[in-house]
């Protein structure tokens, strides 16, 4: 009345659905419902007071959007980090029993360091919300194709192409040159690449079927390749006892999902009483993936060991560096066999060559540390003296697999 120098008239809504409930009052001046009106059109959720111009909601909202709560102190967790594969929530309650317990474990030097580099200490409870499911843990595989039965050349020609291109690491163009000028076989470099894709379909099936049991301790790492001029990553897992490759997943990132896929495949044939341990570098995707896999395991949880840097600056790196060196040696061998390709034009070509490389590495390639045996010796391959004969035997066996 002081502002307008006359009494304010009540709101007169034209439609019944725009009337404010009778028991509603302004939280600021306690004005009754006849001086209130909806201020957001058809939504009818925000109310404005005609007397004091206060804005408020018809239905009271929660004061926070917390999805998760700390199981130790029942305090709301806040979103700490958001990544493509997972979101990390953290408890910021200074009276949380977990925080107090971890803080009290610090020695004097660690307490001093925490004042300047607090991020190096994980003292508070954390919860990870993953943005993928078990159905998405699909290991990379070549596209299904039956075109291998429609090739114009003989199976011997195809196996010769695999011998030179895969086993010996010769480029597709040089392989075609050898086939034409040494064996008088008509084949172009594109023919060699097509044979690689056709054979990879069946060799992948062979690799998965006859991988066999795995060690409780495995080493994991990723190495980069070029696909269409961009970095892609091949995730390998290898057993230290027989040096056999247990997983070979290719992805365009080094995130949690591809690391989880590789580790999940690596332990697929492990027995129920085994307690798996993965030895990797400092890539945070591996512990995050192990955390995801452990959520579905009631017993024999997966453990993780890190080897950091090139020097042994901690006891864990000193103890497990020999395992890390095994997979670094594998990466070097893989680089030799992919160097001739000079990158790949598409991901399918990278998957095909990697699949065939694993077949050669696991079933054909002799290792000095294994008395020049292959990591997975097979009775049907040992008597065959030639590489092209071994490739033919693998493909014939793979043709009979469902």
Image (cartoon, grey):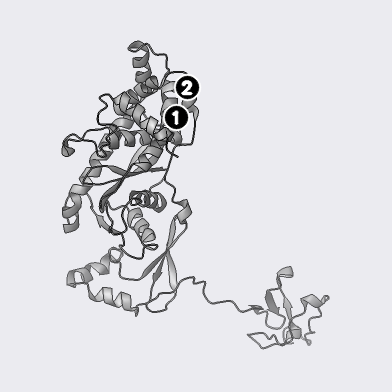
Q: Nearer the viewer, residue 366 or 156?
A: 156
Q: Which residue is mark 2?
A: 151
232 lies above or below 122: above
Q: Are marks 1 and 2 in contact (CB under 8 Å)?
A: yes
Q: Position of residue 281 (x, y in %)?
A: 27, 51
Q: Nearer the viewer, residue 46 or 269?
A: 269
| Residue 228 seen in this snapshot | no
- Mark 1 falls on what kind of element? helix
As drawn, is 371 to the left or to the right of 374?
A: left
Residue 232: x and y in percent read 39, 40
Q: Quadrant of residue 102?
A: bottom left
State which quarter of the image contains the C terminus: top left
Q: Choose the circle earlier in sequence order: 1 or 2.
A: 2
| Mark 1 lies on residue | 198
The secondary structure type at the circle numbered 2 is: loop
State which quarter of the image contains the N terminus: bottom right
């Amino acid at each position: 009345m002081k502002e307008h120098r006359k009494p304010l008239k009540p709101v007169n809504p034209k439609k019944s659905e725009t009337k404010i409930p009778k028991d509603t009052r302004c939280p600021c001046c306690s004005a009754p419902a006849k001086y209130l009106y909806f201020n957001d059109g058809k939504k009818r959720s925000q109310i404005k007071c005609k007397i004091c111009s206060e804005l408020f909601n018809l239905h009271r909202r929660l004061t926070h959007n917390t999805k998760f709560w700390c199981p130790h102190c029942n305090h709301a967790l806040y979103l700490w980090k958001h990544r493509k594969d997972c979101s990390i929530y953290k408890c910021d309650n200074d009276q949380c029993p977990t925080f107090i317990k971890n803080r009290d474990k610090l020695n004097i030097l660690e307490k001093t360091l925490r004042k300047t580099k607090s991020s190096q200490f994980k003292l508070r409870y954390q919860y990870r919300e993953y943005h993928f499911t078990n159905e998405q843990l699909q290991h990379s595989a070549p596209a299904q194709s039956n075109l291998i039965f429609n090739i114009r050349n003989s199976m011997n020609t195809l196996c010769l192409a695999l011998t030179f291109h895969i086993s010996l690491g010769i480029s597709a163009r040089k392989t075609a040159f050898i086939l034409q000028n040494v064996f008088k076989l008509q084949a172009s470099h594109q023919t060699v690449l097509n044979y690689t894709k056709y054979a990879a379909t069946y060799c992948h099936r062979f690799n998965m079927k006859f991988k066999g049991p795995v060690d409780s301790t495995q080493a994991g790492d990723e190495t980069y390749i070029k696909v269409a001029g961009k970095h892609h990553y091949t995730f390998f897992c290898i057993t230290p006892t027989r040096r056999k490759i247990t997983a070979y997943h290719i992805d365009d990132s080094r995130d949690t999902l591809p690391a989880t896929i590789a580790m999940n495949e690596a332990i697929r044939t492990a027995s129920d009483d085994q307690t798996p341990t993965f030895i990797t570098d400092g890539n945070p995707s591996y512990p995050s993936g192990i955390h995801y896999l452990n959520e579905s395991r009631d017993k024999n949880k997966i453990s993780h060991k890190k080897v950091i840097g090139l020097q042994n600056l901690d006891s864990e790196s000193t103890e497990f560096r020999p395992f890390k060196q095994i997979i670094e040696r594998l990466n070097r061998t893989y680089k030799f066999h992919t160097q001739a390709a000079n990158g790949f034009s598409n991901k399918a070509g990278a998957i095909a060559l990697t699949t065939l490389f694993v077949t050669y590495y696991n079933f054909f390639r002799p290792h000095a540390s294994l008395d020049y045996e292959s990591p997975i010796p097979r009775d049907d391959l040992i008597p065959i003296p030639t590489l092209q004969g071994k490739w033919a035997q693998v493909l014939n066996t793979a043709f009979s697999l469902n």
